[in-house]
Amino acid sequence: MLKVFVKALICLLLSMPAIAQTSIYPTNWWVGMKDPSLQLMVHKKDIGDATVKMNPYAGVSLMKTYVPENKNYVFIDLNVAPSAKPGKISFTIQQGRKAETLSFELKKRDPSNGRARVKGVNSSDLVYLIMPDRFSNGDPSNDVVKSARDDQSDRKNPFLRHGGDLKGVENKLDYLKDLGATTIWLTPVIENDMPLMSEWGNKVAGYHGYWFTDHYTVDPRLGGNTAYRQMIETAHNKGLKVIQDAVYNHVGSHHWFILDQPMKSWLNNWPEYQGSNHKEEVFYDPYAAKVDKDIMVGGWFVPHLPDLNLRNPWLAKFLIQHAIWTTEEFGIDGWRVDTYKYCDEQFMNNVNAALEKEFPTITIFGEAWCNTPMASAYFVKNNLDVPFKHNLQGVTDFPIAFGMKDAANNNPTQLYSLLAQDVLYKDPLKNCIFLENHDMDRILSVLGDDVGKLKMANGLLLTLRGIPQAYYGTEVLMKNFKKPSDAEVRKDFAGGWNDDAENKFTSAGRSAAENEFFNYFRTIAQYRFRSEALQKGKTLQYQPVDNVYIYFRYTGKQRVMCVLNPTDDAKEIKMSRFSEGLDGKTTGKEIITGQEMSLTSSIQVPAKTFMLVELR
Protein backbone atom coordinates (compact mmCIF):
# COMPACT_ATOMS: atom_id res chain seq x y z
CA MET A 1 0.00 0.00 0.00
CA LEU A 2 2.82 2.39 0.86
CA LYS A 3 4.58 1.59 -2.42
CA VAL A 4 1.47 2.62 -4.32
CA PHE A 5 1.26 5.80 -2.27
CA VAL A 6 4.94 6.62 -2.87
CA LYS A 7 4.58 6.06 -6.63
CA ALA A 8 1.59 8.38 -6.71
CA LEU A 9 3.49 10.97 -4.70
CA ILE A 10 6.50 10.74 -7.04
CA CYS A 11 4.24 11.32 -10.03
CA LEU A 12 2.73 14.30 -8.27
CA LEU A 13 6.14 15.73 -7.45
CA LEU A 14 7.31 15.34 -11.04
CA SER A 15 4.25 17.21 -12.24
CA MET A 16 4.70 20.10 -9.82
CA PRO A 17 5.74 23.48 -11.22
CA ALA A 18 9.01 24.97 -10.06
CA ILE A 19 8.92 26.85 -6.77
CA ALA A 20 7.94 30.31 -7.93
CA GLN A 21 8.40 32.36 -4.78
CA THR A 22 10.37 32.63 -1.58
CA SER A 23 8.48 31.79 1.60
CA ILE A 24 9.56 32.34 5.21
CA TYR A 25 8.05 30.54 8.19
CA PRO A 26 6.97 31.82 10.64
CA THR A 27 5.52 34.60 8.51
CA ASN A 28 6.37 37.13 11.25
CA TRP A 29 7.32 37.20 14.94
CA TRP A 30 7.27 39.49 17.97
CA VAL A 31 9.74 41.28 20.21
CA GLY A 32 9.49 40.69 23.93
CA MET A 33 8.97 36.93 23.73
CA LYS A 34 10.26 35.06 26.77
CA ASP A 35 12.23 32.67 24.58
CA PRO A 36 14.70 34.76 22.55
CA SER A 37 15.45 31.96 20.07
CA LEU A 38 13.75 32.01 16.69
CA GLN A 39 14.27 29.64 13.78
CA LEU A 40 13.23 30.71 10.29
CA MET A 41 12.57 28.10 7.60
CA VAL A 42 13.10 29.63 4.17
CA HIS A 43 11.69 27.77 1.17
CA LYS A 44 13.06 28.77 -2.22
CA LYS A 45 14.34 26.89 -5.26
CA ASP A 46 18.02 25.95 -4.70
CA ILE A 47 18.44 28.37 -1.81
CA GLY A 48 20.82 25.89 -0.23
CA ASP A 49 23.38 26.89 -2.86
CA ALA A 50 23.00 30.57 -2.02
CA THR A 51 24.71 32.83 0.49
CA VAL A 52 22.35 34.12 3.18
CA LYS A 53 23.30 37.30 5.00
CA MET A 54 21.28 39.17 7.61
CA ASN A 55 21.62 42.93 7.39
CA PRO A 56 22.34 44.63 10.73
CA TYR A 57 19.35 44.99 13.10
CA ALA A 58 19.76 46.19 16.67
CA GLY A 59 19.05 43.46 19.20
CA VAL A 60 18.85 40.61 16.67
CA SER A 61 21.75 38.25 16.02
CA LEU A 62 22.16 35.56 13.39
CA MET A 63 23.41 32.52 15.30
CA LYS A 64 23.76 29.94 12.52
CA THR A 65 22.27 28.59 9.30
CA TYR A 66 21.62 25.00 8.29
CA VAL A 67 21.07 23.59 4.81
CA PRO A 68 19.30 20.19 4.82
CA GLU A 69 19.66 17.52 2.10
CA ASN A 70 16.91 19.22 0.09
CA LYS A 71 18.57 22.43 -1.05
CA ASN A 72 15.24 24.14 -1.55
CA TYR A 73 15.42 24.97 2.16
CA VAL A 74 17.62 26.80 4.59
CA PHE A 75 17.07 27.14 8.34
CA ILE A 76 18.20 30.38 9.99
CA ASP A 77 18.63 30.56 13.77
CA LEU A 78 18.23 34.02 15.28
CA ASN A 79 18.45 35.45 18.78
CA VAL A 80 15.98 38.24 19.47
CA ALA A 81 17.23 40.06 22.54
CA PRO A 82 14.86 41.81 24.99
CA SER A 83 16.25 45.12 23.72
CA ALA A 84 15.04 44.50 20.14
CA LYS A 85 12.37 46.88 18.84
CA PRO A 86 9.54 46.24 16.36
CA GLY A 87 10.56 46.62 12.76
CA LYS A 88 11.63 44.73 9.67
CA ILE A 89 14.72 42.58 9.46
CA SER A 90 16.17 42.18 5.97
CA PHE A 91 18.16 39.29 4.52
CA THR A 92 20.21 39.28 1.33
CA ILE A 93 20.03 36.02 -0.62
CA GLN A 94 22.89 35.82 -3.13
CA GLN A 95 22.50 33.10 -5.78
CA GLY A 96 25.28 33.47 -8.35
CA ARG A 97 24.86 36.90 -9.86
CA LYS A 98 21.31 37.25 -8.62
CA ALA A 99 20.57 38.86 -5.27
CA GLU A 100 17.24 38.98 -3.52
CA THR A 101 16.28 40.91 -0.41
CA LEU A 102 13.83 39.25 1.97
CA SER A 103 11.98 41.14 4.67
CA PHE A 104 10.82 39.67 7.98
CA GLU A 105 8.69 41.66 10.43
CA LEU A 106 9.02 41.79 14.18
CA LYS A 107 5.86 43.13 15.81
CA LYS A 108 4.93 44.35 19.27
CA ARG A 109 3.14 41.77 21.44
CA ASP A 110 -0.50 42.34 22.33
CA PRO A 111 -0.67 43.91 25.81
CA SER A 112 -4.09 42.36 26.59
CA ASN A 113 -2.84 38.75 26.67
CA GLY A 114 -4.09 36.99 29.78
CA ARG A 115 -6.81 39.59 30.29
CA ALA A 116 -8.99 40.19 27.25
CA ARG A 117 -7.47 37.33 25.24
CA VAL A 118 -5.45 34.15 25.85
CA LYS A 119 -7.40 33.89 29.10
CA GLY A 120 -7.49 30.13 29.30
CA VAL A 121 -10.47 27.83 29.79
CA ASN A 122 -11.36 26.15 33.07
CA SER A 123 -14.09 24.27 34.89
CA SER A 124 -16.20 27.42 35.10
CA ASP A 125 -16.65 27.29 31.32
CA LEU A 126 -19.00 25.43 28.99
CA VAL A 127 -17.39 24.54 25.65
CA TYR A 128 -19.50 24.28 22.51
CA LEU A 129 -17.90 22.22 19.71
CA ILE A 130 -18.59 23.37 16.15
CA MET A 131 -17.63 22.00 12.75
CA PRO A 132 -17.70 25.34 10.87
CA ASP A 133 -18.51 23.88 7.44
CA ARG A 134 -21.68 22.33 8.88
CA PHE A 135 -22.86 25.10 11.22
CA SER A 136 -23.71 28.31 9.41
CA ASN A 137 -22.91 29.97 6.08
CA GLY A 138 -22.29 33.66 6.68
CA ASP A 139 -20.50 34.38 3.40
CA PRO A 140 -21.66 32.38 0.34
CA SER A 141 -19.01 34.05 -1.80
CA ASN A 142 -16.30 31.78 -0.33
CA ASP A 143 -18.19 28.49 -0.75
CA VAL A 144 -16.07 27.63 -3.79
CA VAL A 145 -12.44 28.58 -4.33
CA LYS A 146 -11.64 27.83 -7.96
CA SER A 147 -7.89 27.67 -7.37
CA ALA A 148 -8.30 24.89 -4.78
CA ARG A 149 -7.70 21.23 -5.55
CA ASP A 150 -11.24 20.60 -4.33
CA ASP A 151 -13.48 23.22 -5.91
CA GLN A 152 -16.86 21.69 -5.08
CA SER A 153 -19.59 22.65 -2.63
CA ASP A 154 -22.83 20.69 -2.55
CA ARG A 155 -25.09 20.37 0.49
CA LYS A 156 -26.89 17.43 -1.08
CA ASN A 157 -23.68 15.39 -0.94
CA PRO A 158 -22.72 14.45 2.66
CA PHE A 159 -19.07 13.99 1.68
CA LEU A 160 -18.47 17.40 0.09
CA ARG A 161 -18.13 20.85 1.58
CA HIS A 162 -21.36 22.63 2.46
CA GLY A 163 -20.25 26.26 2.74
CA GLY A 164 -20.35 26.92 6.47
CA ASP A 165 -17.69 29.41 7.52
CA LEU A 166 -16.26 31.64 10.23
CA LYS A 167 -18.62 34.51 9.43
CA GLY A 168 -21.46 32.08 10.01
CA VAL A 169 -20.07 31.19 13.43
CA GLU A 170 -19.64 34.87 14.23
CA ASN A 171 -23.27 35.52 13.30
CA LYS A 172 -24.43 32.92 15.85
CA LEU A 173 -22.37 34.00 18.86
CA ASP A 174 -25.38 35.59 20.57
CA TYR A 175 -27.29 32.32 20.19
CA LEU A 176 -24.43 30.42 21.84
CA LYS A 177 -24.12 32.89 24.67
CA ASP A 178 -27.86 32.73 25.34
CA LEU A 179 -27.63 28.94 25.43
CA GLY A 180 -25.09 29.20 28.23
CA ALA A 181 -21.88 28.47 26.34
CA THR A 182 -18.82 30.46 27.36
CA THR A 183 -16.30 28.96 24.92
CA ILE A 184 -16.36 27.78 21.32
CA TRP A 185 -14.09 25.04 20.04
CA LEU A 186 -13.89 24.79 16.27
CA THR A 187 -12.61 21.77 14.39
CA PRO A 188 -9.42 22.90 12.60
CA VAL A 189 -9.58 26.09 10.57
CA ILE A 190 -6.16 25.66 8.92
CA GLU A 191 -6.08 25.32 5.14
CA ASN A 192 -7.01 21.87 3.79
CA ASP A 193 -6.12 22.25 0.11
CA MET A 194 -6.50 18.53 -0.59
CA PRO A 195 -8.19 16.84 -3.54
CA LEU A 196 -11.11 14.57 -2.78
CA MET A 197 -9.78 11.47 -1.03
CA SER A 198 -11.11 7.91 -0.90
CA GLU A 199 -12.73 7.14 2.46
CA TRP A 200 -15.71 4.95 3.38
CA GLY A 201 -15.96 3.92 -0.27
CA ASN A 202 -16.59 7.53 -1.34
CA LYS A 203 -14.71 10.57 -2.55
CA VAL A 204 -14.51 12.80 0.53
CA ALA A 205 -13.53 16.44 1.00
CA GLY A 206 -11.46 17.76 3.89
CA TYR A 207 -14.43 19.79 5.17
CA HIS A 208 -13.66 18.70 8.75
CA GLY A 209 -10.28 20.44 8.75
CA TYR A 210 -7.90 17.68 9.84
CA TRP A 211 -5.87 17.49 6.58
CA PHE A 212 -3.49 20.46 6.92
CA THR A 213 -1.72 21.77 3.83
CA ASP A 214 -0.41 25.16 5.05
CA HIS A 215 -0.12 25.87 8.78
CA TYR A 216 0.03 29.64 8.37
CA THR A 217 -3.13 29.98 6.28
CA VAL A 218 -6.70 29.75 7.54
CA ASP A 219 -8.73 27.96 4.87
CA PRO A 220 -10.10 30.56 2.42
CA ARG A 221 -13.35 28.58 2.19
CA LEU A 222 -13.85 29.48 5.85
CA GLY A 223 -12.98 33.10 5.20
CA GLY A 224 -9.20 33.10 5.67
CA ASN A 225 -7.04 34.73 8.33
CA THR A 226 -9.03 37.97 8.34
CA ALA A 227 -12.34 36.27 9.04
CA TYR A 228 -10.78 34.17 11.81
CA ARG A 229 -9.27 37.21 13.48
CA GLN A 230 -12.58 39.07 13.25
CA MET A 231 -14.59 36.15 14.64
CA ILE A 232 -12.26 35.80 17.62
CA GLU A 233 -12.30 39.52 18.31
CA THR A 234 -16.09 39.56 18.18
CA ALA A 235 -16.29 36.53 20.47
CA HIS A 236 -13.98 38.16 22.99
CA ASN A 237 -15.98 41.38 22.91
CA LYS A 238 -19.07 39.32 23.76
CA GLY A 239 -17.29 37.60 26.65
CA LEU A 240 -16.78 34.30 24.83
CA LYS A 241 -13.52 32.35 24.59
CA VAL A 242 -12.08 30.40 21.66
CA ILE A 243 -10.23 27.06 21.57
CA GLN A 244 -8.26 26.05 18.48
CA ASP A 245 -7.81 22.43 17.39
CA ALA A 246 -4.17 21.37 16.96
CA VAL A 247 -2.88 18.40 14.98
CA TYR A 248 0.79 17.53 15.44
CA ASN A 249 0.67 13.83 14.54
CA HIS A 250 0.06 14.16 10.81
CA VAL A 251 -0.76 16.47 7.90
CA GLY A 252 -2.46 16.11 4.55
CA SER A 253 -0.50 14.46 1.75
CA HIS A 254 -0.60 17.71 -0.25
CA HIS A 255 0.97 19.90 2.41
CA TRP A 256 3.70 21.95 0.74
CA PHE A 257 6.38 20.51 3.02
CA ILE A 258 5.26 16.98 2.11
CA LEU A 259 5.29 17.63 -1.63
CA ASP A 260 8.80 19.04 -1.18
CA GLN A 261 10.18 17.46 1.99
CA PRO A 262 13.11 19.28 3.62
CA MET A 263 14.78 16.01 4.63
CA LYS A 264 14.20 12.25 4.61
CA SER A 265 13.62 12.14 8.37
CA TRP A 266 10.67 14.58 8.12
CA LEU A 267 8.24 11.62 8.33
CA ASN A 268 7.99 8.35 10.19
CA ASN A 269 9.15 6.10 7.37
CA TRP A 270 8.67 2.34 7.12
CA PRO A 271 9.81 -0.28 4.56
CA GLU A 272 6.13 -0.71 3.66
CA TYR A 273 2.92 0.91 4.84
CA GLN A 274 2.51 0.58 8.62
CA GLY A 275 -0.63 1.69 10.43
CA SER A 276 -0.70 2.51 14.12
CA ASN A 277 -1.73 -0.27 16.50
CA HIS A 278 -3.77 2.28 18.55
CA LYS A 279 -2.65 0.62 21.82
CA GLU A 280 -1.85 3.27 24.40
CA GLU A 281 -1.02 0.55 26.95
CA VAL A 282 2.49 0.35 25.46
CA PHE A 283 3.42 3.60 27.22
CA TYR A 284 2.89 2.40 30.77
CA ASP A 285 3.00 -1.39 30.39
CA PRO A 286 6.17 -2.53 32.26
CA TYR A 287 6.37 -5.51 29.90
CA ALA A 288 5.77 -3.70 26.59
CA ALA A 289 7.93 -4.48 23.57
CA LYS A 290 9.72 -1.54 21.97
CA VAL A 291 8.44 -2.44 18.51
CA ASP A 292 4.85 -2.09 19.73
CA LYS A 293 5.57 1.40 21.07
CA ASP A 294 7.30 2.35 17.82
CA ILE A 295 4.25 1.24 15.83
CA MET A 296 1.89 3.09 18.17
CA VAL A 297 3.76 6.38 17.76
CA GLY A 298 5.15 6.02 14.24
CA GLY A 299 2.37 4.13 12.51
CA TRP A 300 0.22 6.08 10.08
CA PHE A 301 -3.56 6.55 10.30
CA VAL A 302 -4.18 6.27 6.56
CA PRO A 303 -1.90 6.68 3.51
CA HIS A 304 -3.10 10.20 2.73
CA LEU A 305 -2.14 11.48 6.21
CA PRO A 306 1.67 11.38 6.38
CA ASP A 307 2.84 10.73 9.93
CA LEU A 308 5.23 13.43 11.13
CA ASN A 309 8.51 12.53 12.81
CA LEU A 310 8.22 14.78 15.85
CA ARG A 311 11.72 13.76 16.95
CA ASN A 312 13.14 15.73 14.01
CA PRO A 313 14.39 18.95 15.69
CA TRP A 314 13.66 21.24 12.72
CA LEU A 315 10.14 19.95 12.27
CA ALA A 316 9.55 20.13 16.02
CA LYS A 317 10.72 23.76 16.07
CA PHE A 318 8.45 24.57 13.12
CA LEU A 319 5.40 23.12 14.90
CA ILE A 320 6.17 24.66 18.29
CA GLN A 321 6.71 28.09 16.77
CA HIS A 322 3.49 27.75 14.82
CA ALA A 323 1.55 27.05 18.02
CA ILE A 324 3.06 30.14 19.64
CA TRP A 325 2.52 32.21 16.50
CA THR A 326 -1.16 31.24 16.28
CA THR A 327 -1.79 32.05 19.92
CA GLU A 328 -0.20 35.49 19.68
CA GLU A 329 -1.49 36.31 16.20
CA PHE A 330 -5.15 35.47 16.82
CA GLY A 331 -5.41 35.60 20.61
CA ILE A 332 -7.01 32.20 21.10
CA ASP A 333 -7.62 31.14 24.69
CA GLY A 334 -6.63 27.50 24.55
CA TRP A 335 -5.78 24.41 22.53
CA ARG A 336 -7.42 21.03 22.10
CA VAL A 337 -4.78 18.66 20.74
CA ASP A 338 -6.00 16.01 18.33
CA THR A 339 -4.53 12.45 18.38
CA TYR A 340 -2.46 13.33 21.44
CA LYS A 341 -1.58 9.79 22.44
CA TYR A 342 -0.02 9.06 19.04
CA CYS A 343 2.57 11.84 19.31
CA ASP A 344 6.15 11.64 20.52
CA GLU A 345 5.97 12.14 24.28
CA GLN A 346 8.93 14.48 24.71
CA PHE A 347 7.76 16.65 21.82
CA MET A 348 4.36 17.06 23.45
CA ASN A 349 5.93 18.10 26.74
CA ASN A 350 8.11 20.57 24.85
CA VAL A 351 5.27 22.25 22.96
CA ASN A 352 3.12 22.43 26.09
CA ALA A 353 5.95 23.99 28.08
CA ALA A 354 6.72 26.48 25.30
CA LEU A 355 3.11 27.63 25.13
CA GLU A 356 2.81 27.97 28.89
CA LYS A 357 6.08 29.90 29.04
CA GLU A 358 4.83 32.53 26.61
CA PHE A 359 1.18 32.43 27.75
CA PRO A 360 0.93 31.44 31.44
CA THR A 361 -2.89 31.58 31.41
CA ILE A 362 -3.39 29.33 28.37
CA THR A 363 -5.28 26.03 28.58
CA ILE A 364 -4.27 22.83 26.78
CA PHE A 365 -6.17 19.56 26.82
CA GLY A 366 -5.38 16.54 24.69
CA GLU A 367 -7.52 14.01 22.90
CA ALA A 368 -6.57 10.58 24.21
CA TRP A 369 -9.30 8.11 23.34
CA CYS A 370 -8.78 5.72 26.24
CA ASN A 371 -11.10 3.28 27.97
CA THR A 372 -9.70 3.49 31.50
CA PRO A 373 -8.83 6.29 33.95
CA MET A 374 -5.36 4.75 34.26
CA ALA A 375 -4.72 5.29 30.56
CA SER A 376 -6.22 8.78 30.53
CA ALA A 377 -4.27 9.84 33.61
CA TYR A 378 -1.00 8.68 32.08
CA PHE A 379 -1.10 11.48 29.48
CA VAL A 380 -1.62 14.34 31.99
CA LYS A 381 -0.07 15.55 35.22
CA ASN A 382 -0.74 12.58 37.44
CA ASN A 383 0.00 10.73 40.65
CA LEU A 384 1.39 7.66 38.89
CA ASP A 385 4.84 6.16 39.35
CA VAL A 386 5.77 5.81 35.69
CA PRO A 387 9.05 6.31 33.78
CA PHE A 388 7.78 9.26 31.71
CA LYS A 389 5.81 12.10 33.25
CA HIS A 390 3.56 14.18 31.00
CA ASN A 391 2.98 17.88 31.67
CA LEU A 392 -0.40 18.14 29.91
CA GLN A 393 -3.02 20.02 31.93
CA GLY A 394 -6.07 17.93 31.07
CA VAL A 395 -7.39 15.20 28.81
CA THR A 396 -10.63 14.59 26.94
CA ASP A 397 -12.20 12.24 29.47
CA PHE A 398 -13.54 9.32 27.45
CA PRO A 399 -14.06 7.01 30.47
CA ILE A 400 -16.38 9.57 32.07
CA ALA A 401 -18.18 9.99 28.73
CA PHE A 402 -18.93 6.27 28.66
CA GLY A 403 -19.82 6.34 32.37
CA MET A 404 -22.39 9.11 31.90
CA LYS A 405 -23.97 7.19 29.04
CA ASP A 406 -24.22 4.05 31.19
CA ALA A 407 -25.66 6.07 34.07
CA ALA A 408 -28.42 7.46 31.88
CA ASN A 409 -29.06 3.87 30.75
CA ASN A 410 -29.81 2.77 34.33
CA ASN A 411 -26.29 1.84 35.45
CA PRO A 412 -24.76 4.68 37.52
CA THR A 413 -22.45 2.34 39.46
CA GLN A 414 -19.82 2.47 36.71
CA LEU A 415 -19.77 6.28 36.75
CA TYR A 416 -19.36 6.24 40.53
CA SER A 417 -16.41 3.86 40.20
CA LEU A 418 -14.78 5.93 37.47
CA LEU A 419 -14.97 9.12 39.52
CA ALA A 420 -13.51 7.26 42.49
CA GLN A 421 -10.36 6.86 40.38
CA ASP A 422 -9.81 10.62 40.15
CA VAL A 423 -7.09 9.95 42.69
CA LEU A 424 -4.90 9.22 39.65
CA TYR A 425 -5.04 12.84 38.40
CA LYS A 426 -3.24 15.86 39.80
CA ASP A 427 -6.28 18.00 38.95
CA PRO A 428 -9.33 16.23 37.45
CA LEU A 429 -11.16 19.56 37.17
CA LYS A 430 -8.95 20.29 34.17
CA ASN A 431 -10.28 17.30 32.24
CA CYS A 432 -12.75 18.01 29.45
CA ILE A 433 -15.92 15.93 29.87
CA PHE A 434 -18.42 15.29 27.07
CA LEU A 435 -21.10 12.95 25.78
CA GLU A 436 -20.35 13.12 22.06
CA ASN A 437 -18.19 14.78 19.47
CA HIS A 438 -17.60 14.77 15.71
CA ASP A 439 -16.02 11.29 15.82
CA MET A 440 -18.75 9.59 17.87
CA ASP A 441 -22.33 8.44 17.45
CA ARG A 442 -24.77 11.14 18.46
CA ILE A 443 -25.73 10.63 22.11
CA LEU A 444 -29.49 10.85 21.46
CA SER A 445 -29.26 7.88 19.10
CA VAL A 446 -26.99 6.00 21.51
CA LEU A 447 -29.70 6.44 24.15
CA GLY A 448 -32.37 5.00 21.90
CA ASP A 449 -33.92 8.36 20.91
CA ASP A 450 -35.10 8.66 24.52
CA VAL A 451 -35.20 12.38 25.36
CA GLY A 452 -35.67 11.55 29.04
CA LYS A 453 -32.35 9.74 29.03
CA LEU A 454 -30.81 12.62 27.06
CA LYS A 455 -31.91 14.99 29.81
CA MET A 456 -30.33 12.85 32.50
CA ALA A 457 -27.07 12.51 30.59
CA ASN A 458 -26.80 16.26 30.02
CA GLY A 459 -27.73 16.93 33.63
CA LEU A 460 -24.66 14.92 34.56
CA LEU A 461 -22.53 16.64 31.92
CA LEU A 462 -23.35 20.10 33.23
CA THR A 463 -22.86 19.32 36.93
CA LEU A 464 -19.95 16.87 37.24
CA ARG A 465 -16.35 17.95 37.78
CA GLY A 466 -14.30 19.09 34.82
CA ILE A 467 -14.78 21.30 31.77
CA PRO A 468 -18.04 20.31 30.05
CA GLN A 469 -18.17 20.22 26.25
CA ALA A 470 -21.38 20.04 24.21
CA TYR A 471 -21.53 19.16 20.50
CA TYR A 472 -23.37 21.44 18.10
CA GLY A 473 -27.02 20.58 17.63
CA THR A 474 -27.45 18.43 20.73
CA GLU A 475 -29.65 21.15 22.17
CA VAL A 476 -32.09 20.78 19.24
CA LEU A 477 -32.10 16.97 19.30
CA MET A 478 -29.74 16.29 16.41
CA LYS A 479 -29.10 12.56 16.21
CA ASN A 480 -27.63 9.72 14.09
CA PHE A 481 -25.15 6.87 14.14
CA LYS A 482 -21.93 6.82 12.13
CA LYS A 483 -23.53 4.58 9.54
CA PRO A 484 -22.34 4.35 6.86
CA SER A 485 -19.81 7.08 7.73
CA ASP A 486 -18.87 9.94 10.04
CA ALA A 487 -20.81 12.29 7.78
CA GLU A 488 -24.03 11.10 9.42
CA VAL A 489 -23.07 12.72 12.73
CA ARG A 490 -21.92 15.93 11.01
CA LYS A 491 -25.19 17.13 9.50
CA ASP A 492 -25.89 20.79 8.83
CA PHE A 493 -27.45 22.84 11.60
CA ALA A 494 -30.86 23.71 10.20
CA GLY A 495 -31.19 27.48 9.86
CA GLY A 496 -27.53 28.12 9.22
CA TRP A 497 -28.21 28.67 5.50
CA ASN A 498 -30.53 31.33 4.12
CA ASP A 499 -32.55 28.85 2.05
CA ASP A 500 -33.18 26.40 4.93
CA ALA A 501 -36.85 25.51 5.37
CA GLU A 502 -36.44 25.43 9.17
CA ASN A 503 -34.39 27.60 11.51
CA LYS A 504 -33.47 25.77 14.70
CA PHE A 505 -31.63 28.83 15.96
CA THR A 506 -35.02 30.33 16.87
CA SER A 507 -37.75 29.04 19.16
CA ALA A 508 -40.28 29.54 16.37
CA GLY A 509 -38.31 27.22 14.12
CA ARG A 510 -38.04 24.43 16.68
CA SER A 511 -40.64 21.77 17.43
CA ALA A 512 -42.28 21.53 20.84
CA ALA A 513 -39.98 18.64 21.79
CA GLU A 514 -36.91 20.52 20.59
CA ASN A 515 -37.87 23.62 22.55
CA GLU A 516 -38.50 21.56 25.67
CA PHE A 517 -35.03 20.05 25.60
CA PHE A 518 -33.40 23.33 24.49
CA ASN A 519 -34.91 25.08 27.51
CA TYR A 520 -33.91 22.23 29.81
CA PHE A 521 -30.29 22.41 28.65
CA ARG A 522 -30.28 26.21 28.74
CA THR A 523 -31.71 26.33 32.27
CA ILE A 524 -28.94 24.17 33.70
CA ALA A 525 -26.21 25.79 31.60
CA GLN A 526 -27.26 29.29 32.61
CA TYR A 527 -27.47 28.24 36.26
CA ARG A 528 -24.02 26.72 35.98
CA PHE A 529 -22.76 30.05 34.70
CA ARG A 530 -23.88 31.60 38.01
CA SER A 531 -23.00 28.70 40.33
CA GLU A 532 -19.70 28.75 42.18
CA ALA A 533 -20.27 25.19 43.40
CA LEU A 534 -20.72 23.77 39.87
CA GLN A 535 -17.91 25.81 38.40
CA LYS A 536 -15.13 25.00 40.83
CA GLY A 537 -16.57 23.16 43.82
CA LYS A 538 -15.41 19.93 45.40
CA THR A 539 -17.34 16.70 44.85
CA LEU A 540 -18.87 14.43 47.46
CA GLN A 541 -20.46 11.32 46.01
CA TYR A 542 -22.48 8.49 47.54
CA GLN A 543 -22.51 4.93 46.32
CA PRO A 544 -25.61 4.31 44.18
CA VAL A 545 -28.35 2.45 46.05
CA ASP A 546 -31.21 0.89 44.11
CA ASN A 547 -29.65 2.55 41.02
CA VAL A 548 -30.15 6.06 42.41
CA TYR A 549 -26.97 8.15 42.33
CA ILE A 550 -26.57 11.26 44.50
CA TYR A 551 -23.60 13.61 44.66
CA PHE A 552 -22.91 17.09 45.98
CA ARG A 553 -20.83 19.94 44.57
CA TYR A 554 -19.81 22.48 47.15
CA THR A 555 -17.63 25.40 48.16
CA GLY A 556 -17.56 27.34 51.39
CA LYS A 557 -20.30 29.59 49.99
CA GLN A 558 -22.63 27.25 48.10
CA ARG A 559 -23.84 23.65 48.03
CA VAL A 560 -25.87 21.87 45.39
CA MET A 561 -27.24 18.33 45.44
CA CYS A 562 -27.55 16.33 42.23
CA VAL A 563 -29.92 13.36 42.13
CA LEU A 564 -30.08 10.85 39.27
CA ASN A 565 -32.90 8.31 39.15
CA PRO A 566 -32.54 6.50 35.81
CA THR A 567 -34.98 3.74 36.77
CA ASP A 568 -38.56 3.30 35.56
CA ASP A 569 -39.93 3.81 39.08
CA ALA A 570 -40.33 6.84 41.31
CA LYS A 571 -38.15 6.70 44.42
CA GLU A 572 -38.50 8.00 47.95
CA ILE A 573 -35.06 8.98 49.22
CA LYS A 574 -34.50 9.36 52.95
CA MET A 575 -32.21 12.27 53.71
CA SER A 576 -30.62 10.90 56.89
CA ARG A 577 -27.91 9.13 54.86
CA PHE A 578 -26.80 12.39 53.26
CA SER A 579 -26.17 14.52 56.34
CA GLU A 580 -22.52 15.09 55.39
CA GLY A 581 -23.52 16.50 52.03
CA LEU A 582 -26.43 18.52 53.40
CA ASP A 583 -24.14 20.12 56.00
CA GLY A 584 -27.07 21.22 58.13
CA LYS A 585 -29.15 22.60 55.28
CA THR A 586 -32.83 21.72 55.55
CA THR A 587 -34.39 23.25 52.44
CA GLY A 588 -33.54 23.64 48.80
CA LYS A 589 -34.75 24.83 45.43
CA GLU A 590 -34.90 22.44 42.47
CA ILE A 591 -33.38 24.56 39.71
CA ILE A 592 -34.98 22.87 36.70
CA THR A 593 -38.58 23.08 37.93
CA GLY A 594 -38.23 25.96 40.39
CA GLN A 595 -39.84 23.82 43.13
CA GLU A 596 -39.03 24.59 46.78
CA MET A 597 -38.17 21.45 48.75
CA SER A 598 -37.90 20.31 52.34
CA LEU A 599 -34.85 18.15 53.01
CA THR A 600 -35.53 17.27 56.63
CA SER A 601 -37.00 13.82 56.10
CA SER A 602 -37.24 12.45 52.57
CA ILE A 603 -37.69 13.58 48.98
CA GLN A 604 -39.66 12.12 46.10
CA VAL A 605 -37.70 11.55 42.90
CA PRO A 606 -39.74 10.79 39.75
CA ALA A 607 -38.70 8.00 37.41
CA LYS A 608 -36.03 8.78 34.79
CA THR A 609 -35.21 12.13 36.31
CA PHE A 610 -32.21 14.29 37.04
CA MET A 611 -32.69 16.81 39.85
CA LEU A 612 -30.46 19.79 40.63
CA VAL A 613 -31.13 21.21 44.08
CA GLU A 614 -29.51 24.35 45.49
CA LEU A 615 -29.35 23.96 49.26
CA ARG A 616 -30.61 26.74 51.52
Image (tube, grey):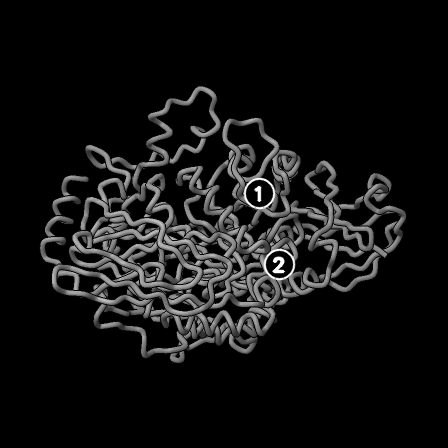
State which mark lies toward you, 1 or 2: 2
Image location of residue 179, percent across then percent down: 60, 68
Q: Which mark is residue 125?
A: 2
Image location of residue 345, percent across then percent down: 44, 37
Residue shown at the point (59%, 66%) measured from the top left: 518
- Tell me if residue 206 can be seen: yes
Residue at label 1?
A: 400
Mark 1 residue crowding within 10 angstroms, few (<14) / some (14–19) / many (20+): many
Image location of residue 436, percent across then percent down: 50, 52
Mark 2 residue crowding within 10 angstroms, few (<14) / some (14–19) / many (20+): many
Residue shown at the point (73%, 55%) measured from the top left: 612
Q: Gap between marks 1 and 2, in whole Å?
A: 18 Å
Q: For residue 203, what is the image quadrant? A: bottom left
* Residue nearest the viewer, comparing 281 with 67: 67
Q: For residue 520, what is the image quadrant? A: bottom right
**Vertically, is 318 above or below 595?**
above
